[in-house]
Amino acid sequence: MCLAIMACAVCWKKVPMRNPLNVLGGNLGDSGEFCKGLYLVEMHYSSVQIANAAYKLLDDARSSLNAMHTMLNNAKQRKLSLERNLAFAQGQKNRAAMARIIADLKRINASRHALFEEKNKQKAEKDKLYQEVKRLNQQTSELKQHIRHCCGSKGQIWFQNLERRKKLRSA
């Protein structure tokens, strides 16, 4: 096994990499398949880590959007309260109160407008993150299947062990 790892290291230093899947296993025979499998498993691990980080960003974006929604609802409630106060002040013909309430309404409306714009930006960012997470998960799945089908019995064993660990985590 150590010889195969050494052969793999030699392979990496001598061959310029264009497509690592094509380079690995060139003239190394069994050790080339072993190296290819090791490399693909490492790629799969890295892909899972990247997808997990992207999902965390997506989850944070969702939380941010929820907070933005709460802020918009609070601003709407404040606006409705000011509108009721304005109607009351108009009934009382209290010009000073009406001027103060109108100024408050203008500030609330400006704040709500800015919040809506920010919410739209954050929603677009969340949607981009969602698409990226989907793409990463798809690529990771394809890589997992490639390892399963192209790395011989060791690839199949790795795949079965991975699926077993996933079942244990979800139970």
Image (tube, rainbow, N blue to C red):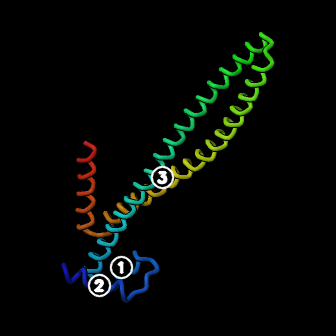
* Residue at x 81% of width, y 18% of height: 95
Q: Where residue 113 appears, x then y in whole percent?
A: 69, 37
The one nearer the camera, 9 or 21, is 9
Disc nearer the start of the sequence (1/3): 1
Q: Where residue 46 appears, x then y in whole percent?
A: 37, 64
Q: Tag 3, which secondary structure?
A: helix
The kind of residue on which mark 2 rests is Leu
Choose top left, top right, bottom left or bottom right for residue 123. top right
Residue for badge 1: 24
Above or below 53: residue 85: above
Residue for badge 3: 134
Residue for badge 2: 28
- Count of numbered labels shown in the rendering: 3
Q: Nearer the viewer, mark 1 or mark 3?
A: 3
| Residues marked 1 and 2 touching at CB (< 8 Å) | yes
The one nearer the camera, 61 or 106, is 106
Badge 2 crowding class, 10 Å Cα cut-off, few under 14, some 14 to 19, many 20 or more, is some
Q: Residue furthest front?
A: 96
Q: Would residue 26 be found to the left or right of residue 58 on screen?
A: left
Q: Residue furthest top?
A: 92
